[in-house]
């Protein structure tokens, strides 16, 4: 699934929740909404050369909360949250080309 955070017509979490396990989510633009990745085997990646950015409100505890297993995060720039990526309940994540 491809999502442009600059032109969202509904909450980002709603779109994320609709992706099945073993799915890939390609983001572009500037995202501002914290999200929960609860399903297993999801890839969340920025698309294009620049990838995607998340700029969370400073009072956000967790930008990306992970409870799913085998989560892959690529080409994202994360800023603002107290914890950019938080992993819970035996969740497992690998991250490449991601900055916070």
Image (cartoon, grey):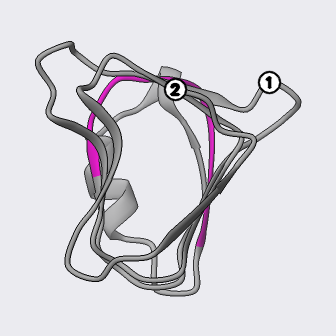
Q: Residues within 10 Å of mark 2 (few under 14, many from 20)?
A: some
Who's the residue at 80% across and 24% down the image? 50
Instruction: Name the residue carrying label 2.
Output: 100
State the CA–CA distance, disc 1 to disc 2: 15 Å
8, above or below 42, in the image = above
Provide the major secondary structure of the magenta segment: strand
The residue nearer to you, when weighing 25 against 79, is 79
Q: Nearer the viewer, residue 13 or 35?
A: 35
Identify the element where label 1 is drawn.
loop
> Which residue does the image show at 75% across and 41% down from the upper left?
97
Eye-nearest disc, 1 or 2: 2
Residue 72 shown left or right of residue 90 in the figure: right
Residue 16 counted in the magenta span? no
Task: Give residue 81's position: percent from left, percent from top.
Answer: 27, 25
- Residue 17 on image: x %, y %: 31, 67
| Quarter where residue 60 is shown | top left
Decide whether residue 25 is among the magenta residues. Answer: yes
Magenta segment boundaries in residue numbering = 24-35
Which image quadrant is residue 98 in?
A: top right
Residue under label 1: 50
């Amino acid at each position: 699934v491809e999502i442009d955070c600059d032109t969202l017509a509904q909450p980002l979490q709603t779109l994320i929740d609709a992706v099945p396990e073993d799915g890939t989510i390609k983001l572009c633009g500037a995202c501002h909404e914290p999200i929960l990745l609860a399903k297993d085997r999801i890839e969340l990646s920025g698309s294009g050369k620049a990838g995607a950015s998340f700029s969370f409100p400073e009072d956000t505890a967790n930008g990306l909360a992970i409870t799913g297993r085998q989560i892959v995060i690529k080409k994202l720039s994360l800023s603002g949250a107290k914890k950019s990526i938080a992993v819970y309940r035996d969740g497992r994540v690998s991250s490449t080309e991601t900055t916070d």
